[in-house]
Image: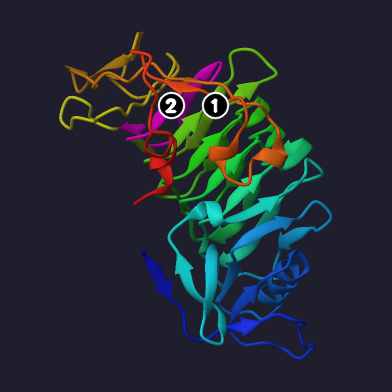
Amino acid sequence: MRYQLGLATLVLGGLASSPLLAATFCVTTPSQFQAALSAAAGNGAHDQVRVHIGNYDVSNVDLVYDPPSGNSNLEISGGWVAFFENPCGIRLDDPWQTTLDGGDQGRILRIAVDDGQADVSVRQLVFMSGHVDPGLGGGLSIAYGADAVGTVVVERNVFLLNSADQAGALNIQGSSLQKITNNLFLLNEGASRAATYLTTTGLFGVSFTNNTVLSNTHSNANQPTVSIAAGRAFMANNNFWDNDGYDASLGANGDPVVVQPFAQAPLEASAVRAHDDVSAPGFQPERETGHVRAAAEGREGTIAPLPTVAVRAMKDRSAVARLETLDGREVVDDAGRDQDVAGLLFAAVRE
């Protein structure tokens, strides 16, 4: 089993009122989680928040990080277990081990950086049943102010059964660079942008790669599941399947959108499928059964055929400790054979 070893960890049984220097916080309860975020927001330094494995009912907890000033980095990660006397000494390589359950009562986690230089990363967590209406980002919302710069990394997370007026699962606004990598967006809902809305005027824009976006739905017709509005946008090697409306909408207000050059690099069972509003010169996708065609720099390329996959799931949250226990789900290929669910759905959260 792969793991990461941690050395110095501050366990939050209760936070002292005295000022804290940069620290690594280990949290084992929802209240400790919020206490760690508050402490990190107030100490003016770089901090790590390590979330011990478990299922966390955060329906009555307001998880917010909103420092009075910037210039401090924040790292949040799940999957931590004890190593000798350190309760968060080793990180397991399994995002499904740490679930934040919003119970459809409110947004799960909000991060705000109003000014200054600050990097934010969120890794290896399950955001389940977050809800906000009106608003954006039922699972996770990250917002940078006009005077704030930094890199946002959202990597190897699961966004499951979240809902919002817009951006049902994830919303990120601002920053210099947004990197959304190896995440699973499954069964999220929104009036528009059921999975995510990513927008920034930052220099480096948005990178959306190696994600699986599956069975997300909208209450309004003809809506994009993933929406990106940035000066630069790079989208490649993602799996989109069974989303209503459009899979992706890419917009550029500066440099052209950069899309994976399909004609140059073969992708197995992976595609970027988008509607005709994609503002990338030479990119004119055609929807076809099982595969996608695209023109890149005047050359026509073909992506390897995608299997015809049917995924039916009941939204019984009591049965979602792990996705394998979802009642009523059936996964078949076009020959009627059972698919390897772990390989099919969990590829987004494996390196």
Task: Give the magenta part as a residue range.
Answer: 237-259
> Quick check: 98 above or below 15?
above
In the rendered structure, which amino acid carries the disc numbered 2? Phe
- Mark before the other along the chain sequence, 1 or 2: 1
Label 1 residue SS: strand
Is 199 on the left-hand or right-hand side of 262? right
Q: Dot 2, crowdedness within 10 Å: few (<14), some or many (≥20)?
A: many
x and y percentages locating residue 346 in the rendered image: 43, 41
Nearer the viewer's eye, disc 1 or disc 2?
A: 2
Residue occupying the far right of the picture: 60
Residue 7 painted magenta: no
Judge by depth and name the residue closer to the eye, 328 or 246. Answer: 328
Q: Residue 345: percent from the left, percent from the top? A: 44, 35
Quadrant placement of the N terminus = bottom left
Question: Which residue is labeled 1 in the image?
Answer: 225
Closer to us: 318 or 121: 318
Above or below for 165 versus 37: above
In the rendering, at what x and y percent does residue 205 appear? 43, 45
Location of residue 276 with respect to 3 vertically, above or below: above
Q: Which mark is residue 240?
A: 2
Mark 2: which secondary structure? Answer: strand
Residue at image location 54% in from the left, 71% down from the top:
81
Mark 1–mark 2 distance (CA, rounded to whole Å): 9 Å
Q: Quadrant of residue 211?
A: top left
x and y percentages locating residue 148 in the rendered image: 57, 60
Name the amino acid type tagged 1. Answer: Thr
**Pointer 1 with pointer 2, Cβ within 8 A:** yes
